[in-house]
Image (spheres, rainbow, N blue to C red):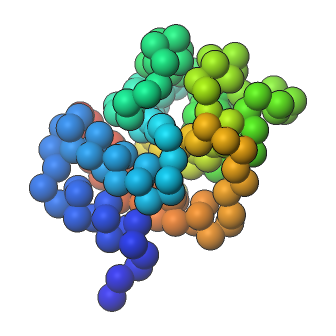
Amino acid sequence: MNESPLVDAVRHTRAGATGVEGFRATLAAVIRHFGADMGMIHRLDPADRHLALVATSDGVPEPVLAAARRIPLGKGIAGETALTGKPVSMCNLQTDTSGVARPGAKASGAQGTLCVPVFRGDQVVGTLGIGVRGERTFTDAETEELLAAGRLLAGPLAQGQV
């Protein structure tokens, strides 16, 4: 039985995927599904409590990439997501006043963003985030769908298959 079109697409992409290119292909499927403009996948290194950038889509500005290559837990959208184990969603990064979005994220050109923890069981092993250039509020159903897609990445992320 099919769980969702996104989960099916991720499962299909992961079936023949290896390494960074496999993660990039999976990310591309996620971006297409949501009509997003960009995305990133990070792996958590529990030893040093940082997220390492595993894959990114085209179109992410270099200053944003530089800031996203290594993120301390609790810093920025992905760091907050990994630390709390809870999705972070913002309708408009440019006007957000929560203090979660770092200046680099605001420079990405994205406005609407959704970042979810990637769980292996109940352990966070990484994050999966997408962004759109216009304002966008992601629904609870979309958040759940992205969480389900992230679970398919958990094994390869936790095993360091990058």
Q: Quadrant of residue 110?
A: top right
Residue 57 location, x and y as percent?
38, 34
**Residue 50 seen:** yes
Give whichever of 56, 127 is nearer the camera: 56
For residue 75, above or below residue 160: above
The quadrant holding residue 44 is top left
Please determine whether, in this image, residue 1 is positioned above or below residue 103: below
Q: Is residue 99 left or right of residue 146?
A: right
Q: Is residue 99 above or below residue 132?
A: above
Q: How many marks do you count on the picture?
A: 0
Instruction: Measuring from the top left, give residue 14's x and y in whole percent.
Output: 23, 56
**Res. 117 visible in picture:** no
Q: Is residue 19 left or right of residue 151?
A: left
Q: Residue furthest bottom?
A: 1
* Quarter that holds the C terminus: top left
Residue at image position (46%, 13%) is 62
Residue visible at 32% across and 71% down in the picture: 8
* Residue 135 image point, x, y percent: 72, 44
Q: Quadrant of residue 84?
A: top right
Residue 150 left/right relative to 109: left
Is 77 or 118 nearer to us in this picture?
77
Which residue is located at x 17 percent, y 60 percent? 15
Identify the image quadrant of the N terminus: bottom left
Q: Residue furthest right?
A: 97
Q: Residue at coordinates 44% horizontally, 43% vertically from top-left? A: 125
